[in-house]
Amino acid sequence: MNIFVGNLNYSITEDDIREIFEEYGELTSVKLITDKFTGRSKGFGFVEMADADEAKKAIEELNGAEVEGRSMVVNESIEKKRDNNRGGGGGGFRGGNNRGGGGGYGRRDNNFRSNY
């Protein structure tokens, strides 16, 4: 089961999170989310536990627990499903009344002057 762990002190490391959660069962992975430019923790991460019952017990007991001066938020992480069939994009073909549809190739404005 994948678990969200939030409201963490920025000084907490993945090893700290691992130590906290290992008391409840076997961990598959621990991932602390960091800023890609500074490398600094963003204050949240994810823990994956092999056994769902152990994970639920960890969630119940650790949600709201104070760690290094902050109350952790711990709950089941629900994976977002991506919709690959989303519309959008702008430009391109617009059928119907021929009233426009985003710029693109071959479009000229009245103020456009070519140097060719």
Image: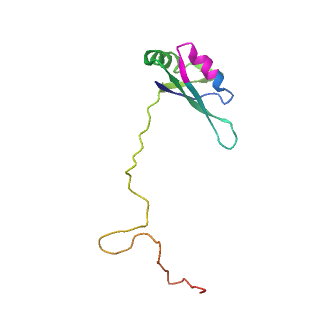
Q: In which quarter of the image is residue 15?
A: top right
- Left of 64 or right of it: where is 99? left
Q: Which residue is drawn at 31% across and 69% down?
A: 95
Q: Quadrant of the C terminus?
A: bottom right
Residue, far top: 23
Q: Position of residue 19 (x, y in %)?
A: 62, 17
Q: Where is residue 89 in the image (x, y as percent from the top left)?
A: 44, 60
Q: Where is residue 67 in the image (x, y as percent from the top left)?
A: 62, 20
Q: Quadrant of residue 14?
A: top right
Residue, far left: 96
- Name the one closer to the observer, 28 or 74: 28
- Left of 28 or right of it: where is 88? left
Magenta span includes 45: no
Q: Is residue 45 above or below residue 103?
A: above
Magenta span includes 22: yes
Q: What stretch is highlighted in magenta?
A: 16-28
